[in-house]
Amino acid sequence: MFVGDEVPLAVGFAAARERLTRLGESGALFGSADDAYAGLARVGAAGVSKLVRVQVRELSWTDRSAGLALRWEAAGGGGALFPVLDADLTIAPAGAGTMLTLAGSYRPPLGSLGEVLDRAILHRVAAATIRSFLAQVAAQLADQPVTNGAGSAPPVSP
């Protein structure tokens, strides 16, 4: 099943790219420092969440876009009851700002029963999870200062 969403950012592409690079390298893109260090993140929406193991490829970029390849797999017991998400998190210039996009796919677990459940409700949960995740990433990209002068945000004092 395809899942995706996009969010406009009021920050220039160069600044967003620098911030996304740092967030991806530090693991801060996905939650608390302890979980990020272990390669884990909590994802979900509407009061339903699951700890997932996150794999991220190094940021690739051109003058027109930048992106991270992501894989989310449920961690811990019962992980086989949850889908694996393979997705691309990308940014691209959009006017004076930047567009943040996540596009991915997952296969519902449990065969044909999982497909029925996905059509009934689970796809809406997946879409809400993606919206929630993108909103968090957008907030991080908009607020995190850029130290190399690429962005318009002023440095934040400790």
Image: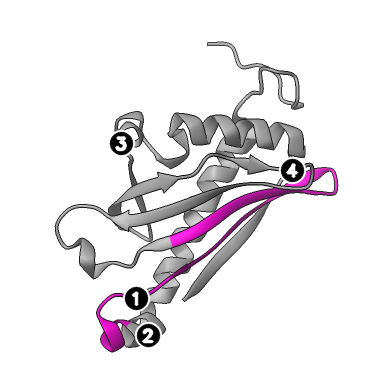
Which of discs 3 and 4 lies nearer the camera? The answer is 4
Q: Magenta segment, which residues?
A: 86-114
Q: Which residue is mark 4?
A: 62
Magenta stretch: helix, strand or loop mostly: strand
Residue 155 coordinates in the image, percent (x, y): 66, 16
Determine whether, in the image, residue 9 is placed left or right of residue 27.
Answer: right
First of labels 2, 3 by sequence position = 3
Question: Residue tagged by mark 1?
Answer: 108
Proximity of marks 3 and 4: CB atoms separated by less than 8 Å: no
Is the residue marked by circle 1 packed among few (<14), some (14-19), or many (20+) residues within 10 Å?
many
Residue projecting furthest to the top: 158
Count neighbours of disc 2 (C-alpha within 10 A) and say few if under 14, some if 14 to 19, many if 20 or more: few
Q: Which mark is residue 120?
A: 2
Amino acid at dot 2: Ala
In front here: 34 or 136?
Answer: 34
Q: Which residue is mark 3?
A: 35
Q: Amino acid at mark 4?
A: Thr
**Which mark lies nearer to you, 2 or 3?**
3
What's the distance in space between the residues labelled 4 and 1, CA to CA?
Answer: 33 Å
